[in-house]
Image: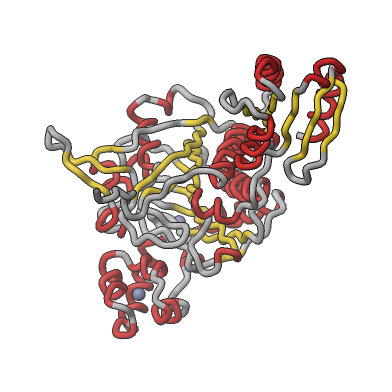
């Protein structure tokens, strides 16, 4: 029979990699609530209109990458390609803007994009992120940036760089776009076919092009920070000042743009030099017009989204206490119940313990312990019962010691 394999661009996650996922999930559930974020979970599919309006019909994501399908009642539904639009939708629909304070949410979960699969990039991929609503201060921008940067450091992602830019607002961006269009028209013939189209649909997106020639040409194009209005200019200065209070360094990156009208002011990205020319580990910014755009009140937004697969690639192997495995072996069948008692007391204390109820022979049990990759085997034999002791065999170097039962807790703390 033909084997069934997982769809292209998806992957199974299992040991030992799953330990890194647990580690990241535990850390982020511990870390972000410090900043008053509360977790929100939204559905994996939504009406297609949410993303058309929330991301924009002109974007690559909406035009080419969405998983959209009709359900049995002929509705157009889409597997979420990102989570911000859904969080905003949920907040509007459930009236959270009037009920939950402060308006801060974090999320984690799978997203879906029909993209070309490559290293660290999947069609079902996972993101975590935060959203802050109703706070227009430059300082909150800096706080969001700081928390994302500091979190990556806390989980030991090395060699990270922060890139910062401002994308202006509806008052100053049109003037910039006019100049950008004029300049890009002048060099139109040198740009790739895609970028030629972007000149008329969304010239900001030219900065996203990965084509080396396009990058070289667009480096000469006008920079948005030279066109900021007074309000956006002041905001940007204040963000930079607040970042210096948080003591994090940044690179000003004029290519960092968000090609959508509701993105405003601060934009940032964090990259890792270990990923090479790969995409960012996370990116975010301010979106003061999205909530209004989706039918909500005129409330500002600020947040980021992080790619979990890419971060996982950067993580060292995770070891924590539960990863050390104990095998309890018994010398003869009558001692199996003693082994169960000992196992129970260890499970109660939270240790990771395995007893084999089928192999009655001690040698076979030890062989099995080896096969599973056990760290320590506790052996219960006649002598141990008489002496109220436990023999402990390290399965790494096969050294064996015997300790008194009352010394076991101490031994566990020192060795597990
Ligand atoms: Zn402005
Ligand atoms: Zn191009």
Between 249 and 350, the one lying in front of the other is 350
Work out whether 363 lies above or below 149. above
Instruction: Tell me where residue 218 appears, x and y as whole percent.
Output: 42, 77
Q: Is residue 328 left or right of residue 181?
A: right
Residue at the image point whose x is 40% and y is 67% from the top: 208
Residue at the image point whose x is 64% and y is 49% from the top: 317
Query: Ligand 1 is found in which quarter of the picture?
Result: bottom left
The quarter of the displayed image where residue 201 is located: bottom left
Residue 234 visible to the viewer: yes
Number of numbered labels in the structure image: 0
Between 84 and 316, the one lying in front of the other is 316
The quarter of the displayed image where residue 214 is located: bottom left
Instruction: Tell me where residue 357 appears, x and y as whole percent.
Output: 58, 23
Work out whether 211 lies above or below 9. below
Q: Quadrant of the C terminus?
A: top right
Residue at the image point whose x is 34% and y is 37% from the top: 44
Task: Identify the coloring.
Answer: secondary structure
Residue 348 visible to the viewer: no
Q: Is residue 99 left or right of residue 390?
A: left
The quarter of the displayed image where residue 332 is located: top right
Residue at the image point whose x is 41% and y is 42% from the top: 110
Instruction: Tell me where residue 69 appears, x and y as whole percent.
Output: 20, 44
Instruction: Tell me where residue 286 appears, x and y as whole percent.
Output: 47, 49
């Amino acid at each position: 029979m033909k084997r069934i394999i997982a769809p292209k661009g998806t992957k199974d996650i299992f040991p030992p990699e799953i330990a890194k996922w647990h580690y990241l999930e535990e850390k982020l559930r511990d870390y972000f609530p410090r900043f008053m974020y509360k977790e929100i979970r939204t559905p994996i599919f939504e009406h297609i209109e949410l993303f058309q309006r929330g991301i924009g019909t002109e974007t690559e994501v909406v035009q080419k990458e969405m998983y959209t399908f009709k359900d049995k009642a002929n509705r157009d539904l889409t597997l979420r390609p990102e989570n911000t639009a859904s969080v905003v939708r949920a907040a509007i629909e459930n009236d959270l803007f009037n009920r939950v304070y402060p308006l801060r949410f974090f999320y984690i979960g799978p997203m879906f994009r029909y993209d070309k699969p490559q290293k660290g990039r999947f069609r079902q991929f996972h993101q975590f992120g935060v959203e802050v609503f109703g706070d227009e201060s430059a300082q909150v921008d800096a706080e969001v940036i700081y928390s994302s940067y500091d979190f990556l450091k806390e989980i030991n992602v090395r060699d990270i760089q922060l890139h910062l830019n401002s994308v202006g607002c509806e008052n100053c961006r049109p003037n910039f776009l006019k100049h950008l269009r004029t300049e890009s028209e002048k060099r139109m013939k040198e740009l790739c076919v895609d970028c030629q189209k972007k000149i008329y649909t969304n010239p900001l997106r030219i900065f996203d092009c990965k084509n080396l020639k396009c990058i070289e040409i667009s480096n000469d194009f006008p920079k948005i920070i030279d066109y900021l209005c007074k309000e956006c200019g002041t905001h940007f200065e204040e963000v930079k000042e607040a970042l210096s209070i948080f003591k994090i360094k940044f690179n000003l990156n004029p290519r960092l743009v968000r090609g959508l009208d509701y993105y405003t002011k601060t934009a940032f990205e964090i990259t890792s030099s270990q990923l090479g020319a790969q995409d960012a580990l996370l990116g975010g910014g301010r979106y003061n017009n999205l909530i209004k755009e989706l039918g909500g009140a005129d409330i500002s937004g600020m947040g980021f989204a992080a790619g979990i697969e890419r971060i996982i690639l950067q993580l060292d192997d995770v070891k924590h206490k539960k990863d050390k495995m104990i095998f309890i072996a018994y010398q003869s069948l009558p001692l199996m119940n003693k082994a169960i008692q000992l196992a129970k007391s260890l499970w109660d204390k939270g240790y990771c313990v395995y007893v084999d109820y089928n192999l009655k022979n001690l040698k076979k049990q030890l062989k099995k312990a080896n096969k599973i990759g056990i760290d320590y085997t506790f052996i219960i034999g006649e002598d141990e019962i008489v002496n109220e002791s436990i023999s402990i065999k390290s399965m790494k170097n096969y050294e064996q010691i015997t300790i008194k039962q009352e010394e076991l807790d101490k031994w566990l703390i020192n060795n597990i």
